[in-house]
Image (cartoon, rainbow, N blue to C red):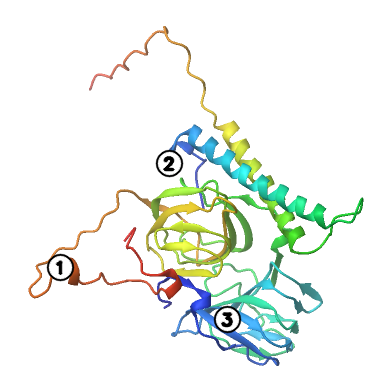
């Protein structure tokens, strides 16, 4: 289980040695969110020296997004804005990464393991750890800098004006929305706003790439990140006036917007030996935050 | 995923509110387009081409793509434009008769 992280700035975090097993070179990572039960993680990785790794398969569903630099994946040279995803067990070609490259690496339903191999882990490799598809998993590569923005597929009734670039879509089962997986880029145009509170049946994670957006948990500016478990309310959005806001999102199912208005919380109790105004207890479930994000003003609690 | 047609009435604000939002978003994004293009022209030699690569060209391309995306919202607003109200003096709509209960 990943904790509720909202809101952190990646520059506030310490560096670790990168968890890129079976590779040679030098890289470091910041852990944006980490599941200590199964080893899933979302990380920012910077390659201090050129790095390479032979072909083989991951032990988790793995996604890379290149913020800066160059990555060679087999015969494909990928630059800034490129994304690729490989499900656990699918053999991917050898990789070479140029010194100075800066990437986001997300892994799900497994840990950092990597097996050098000439073939897949098994005869059939599924599309992912949360899939219901009977189709075999495959390598997905998207160059987002060459992709057009499309209208929001997930408008529900409140967020029609957001724009998307689809990175990966594994549709849910008709019987269970909390299956499948979605990775997208989202752009909230300048001045976009939604003054309501929203929650979803699936987890939602985002890393801020460009612009800014103020919302109930603080300000999403470049490097800001959240991992929000299912059903946590969020909202009161206002995108920046100059560039709007752009981020990369991941969801473990299909996005459904459940809307709350006139939200309020009532906590009742009789203080025995403290001043409830100045010494009252905080509510359980305060999310992980870092110093740049500052304290949460409890808007939308 | 959305399972119904867009209903702007369900979103905060009326059609005018959304039209003002789209106008503002387009204006801000067009400013970025023009700023980036001016920057590229400033880097071009006299009568020469603008630099085809680099951060400024990436910014220009992205701002143009975003501008194009915002034109989808103009089409949406055209599709959802409210019918203008007729002038006064018309017959008031009568109250709907309720059907007698059986």
Q: In the rendered structure, the residue with mark 2 lies on which chain?
A: B
Placement of B86 over or under A53, stated as above or below: above
Q: Residue at x 47, y 18 (%)?
A: B85
Placement of A12 over or under A81, stated as above or below: below
Q: Is residue A122 visible?
A: no
Q: Which residue position holds label 3?
A: A60
Image quadrant occupied by the C terminus of chain A: bottom left
Q: Are marks 3 and 2 on the same chain?
A: no
Q: Is residue B67 visible?
A: yes
Q: Secondary structure at mark 1?
A: helix
**Distance from the alpha carbon under mark 2 to that under mark 1:** 36 Å
Q: Residue at x 66, y 77 (%)?
A: A102
Label 3 CA crowd tier, 10 Å (few <14, some 14–19, many 20+): many
> Left of B49 or right of it: where is B79?
left
* Circle nearer the viewer, 3 or 2: 2
Q: Position of residue A147 (x, y in %)?
A: 71, 57
Q: In the rendered structure, the residue with mark 1 lies on which chain?
A: A
Is residue A157 or residue B58 the one in the foreground?
Answer: B58
Q: Which residue position holds label 1?
A: A276
Q: Which residue position holds label 2?
A: B12
Q: Position of residue A295 (x, y in %)?
A: 36, 69
> Left of A94 or right of it: where is A204?
left
**Distance from the alpha carbon under mark 1 to that under mark 3:** 47 Å
Q: Are marks 1 and 3 on the same chain?
A: yes
Q: Secondary structure at mark 3?
A: loop
**Distance from the alpha carbon under mark 3 to that under mark 2:** 41 Å
Q: Residue at x 76, y 54 (%)?
A: B39
């Amino acid at each position: 289980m990943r904790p509720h992280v909202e809101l952190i700035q990646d520059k506030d975090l310490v560096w670790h040695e990168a968890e890129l097993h079976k590779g040679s070179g030098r890289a470091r990572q910041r852990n944006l969110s980490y599941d200590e039960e199964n080893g899933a993680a979302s990380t920012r990785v910077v390659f201090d020296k050129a790095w390479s790794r032979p072909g083989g398969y991951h032990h988790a569903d793995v996604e890379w997004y290149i913020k800066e630099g160059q990555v060679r994946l087999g015969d494909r040279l990928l630059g800034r804005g490129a994304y690729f995803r490989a499900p656990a067990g699918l053999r991917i070609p050898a990789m070479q990464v140029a010194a100075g490259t800066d990437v986001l690496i997300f892994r799900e339903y497994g840990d950092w393991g990597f097996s050098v191999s000439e073939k897949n882990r098994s005869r059939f490799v599924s599309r992912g750890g949360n899939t219901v598809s009977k189709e075999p998993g495959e390598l997905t590569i998207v160059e987002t800098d060459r992709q057009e923005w499309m209208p929001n597929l997930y408008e529900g009734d409140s967020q029609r004006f957001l724009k998307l670039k689809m990175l990966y879509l594994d549709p849910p089962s008709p019987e269970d929305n909390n299956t499948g997986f979605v990775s997208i880029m989202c752009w909230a145009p300048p001045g976009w706003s939604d003054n309501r509170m929203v929650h979803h049946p699936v987890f939602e994670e985002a890393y801020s790439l460009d612009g800014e957006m103020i919302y109930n948990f603080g300000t999403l500016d470049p490097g800001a990140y959240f991992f929000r478990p299912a059903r946590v309310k969020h909202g009161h959005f206002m995108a920046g006036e100059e560039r709007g806001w752009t981020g990369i999102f991941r969801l473990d199912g299909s996005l459904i917007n459940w809307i709350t208005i006139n939200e309020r919380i009532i906590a009742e109790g009789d203080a025995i030996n403290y001043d409830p105004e100045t010494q009252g207890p905080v509510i359980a479930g305060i999310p992980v935050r870092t110093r740049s994000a500052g304290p949460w003003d409890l808007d939308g609690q | 995923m959305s399972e119904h047609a867009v209903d702007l009435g369900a979103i905060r604000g009326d059609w005018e509110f959304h039209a003002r939002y789209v106008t503002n978003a387009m204006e801000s994004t067009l400013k970025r387009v023009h700023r980036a293009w001016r920057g590229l022209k400033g880097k071009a030699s006299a009568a020469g081409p603008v630099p085809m690569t680099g951060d400024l060209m990436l910014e220009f391309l992205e701002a143009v793509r975003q501008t194009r995306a915002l034109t989808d919202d103009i089409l949406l607003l055209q599709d959802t434009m409210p019918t203008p109200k007729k002038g006064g003096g018309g017959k008031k709509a009568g109250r709907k008769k309720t059907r007698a209960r059986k």
